[in-house]
């Protein structure tokens, strides 16, 4: 399977992971403007790779400016991906959480725990595991990537 690019967008920085169903090829947290400028290269758009981006859903709760900033960045990532000839897909965060933990109320730590249970601990530099090198927002991007490969691309 060709690697896919998964994005956990944030208001200023986003987690990005490339995943082929067996191996993480790249995992980083980068400023949104840097991601936007390099999205076509990072996603391998010259090979028509797919980009999957976590999407925010409204559940009737009040939200602040950071949520709207995150939505704006997701839209900019979509525009850049499609403009480069790639395919772009929005994936609801709730679906990712339900797939990995069975609960929509799960927190990031719960999702991380479920991923470690499924894929093993990160390991060490000398003996890296599948999740070695994942930090902060890249865990959520990895959760998105694994959801996509396990559910959408079966």
Image: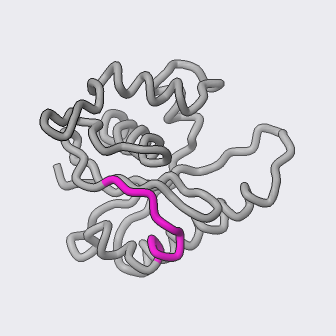
> Image quadrant of residue 132?
top left
Q: Is residue 20 left or right of residue 57?
A: left
Q: Which residue is drawn at the image coordinates 46% and 75% (left, top)?
A: 34
The image's colour scheme reads: one colour
> Image quadrant of residue 50?
bottom left
Which quarter of the figure is the C terminus placed in?
Answer: top left
> Is 30 contained in the magenta span?
yes
Q: Which residue is drawn at the image coordinates 37% and 79% (left, top)?
A: 84
Q: Position of residue 49 (x, y in %)?
A: 28, 64
Q: Position of residue 41 (x, y in %)?
A: 30, 75
Q: Position of residue 127 (x, y in %)?
A: 14, 33
Q: Is residue 1 left or right of residue 120?
A: left
| Nearer-the-camera pick, 120 or 45 | 120
Q: Which residue is drawn at the image coordinates 60% and 67% (left, top)?
A: 73
> Image quadrant of residue 4?
bottom left
User: With respect to residue 34, does 74 lie above or below?
Assistant: above
Highlighted magenta segment, given as a residue range: 27-36
Q: How many marks?
A: 0
> Is 116 contained in the magenta span?
no
| Nearer-the-camera pick, 10 or 53 | 10
Q: Is residue 22 left or right of residue 141?
A: left
């Amino acid at each position: 399977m060709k690697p896919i690019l998964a994005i956990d967008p944030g208001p200023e920085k986003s987690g990005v992971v490339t995943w082929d169903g067996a191996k993480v090829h790249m995992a980083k947290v980068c400023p949104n403007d840097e991601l936007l400028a390099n999205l076509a290269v990072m996603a391998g758009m010259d090979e028509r790779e797919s980009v999957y981006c976590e999407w925010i859903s409204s559940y009737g709760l009040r939200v602040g400016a950071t949520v709207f900033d995150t939505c704006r960045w997701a839209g900019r990532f979509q525009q850049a991906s499609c403009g480069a000839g790639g395919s772009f897909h929005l994936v609801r965060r709730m679906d990712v959480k339900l797939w990995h933990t069975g609960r929509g109320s799960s927190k990031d730590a719960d999702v991380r725990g479920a991923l470690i249970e499924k894929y093993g601990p990160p390991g060490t530099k000398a003996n890296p595991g599948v999740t070695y090198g994942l930090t902060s927002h890249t865990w959520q991007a990895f959760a998105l990537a694994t959801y996509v490969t396990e559910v959408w691309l079966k």
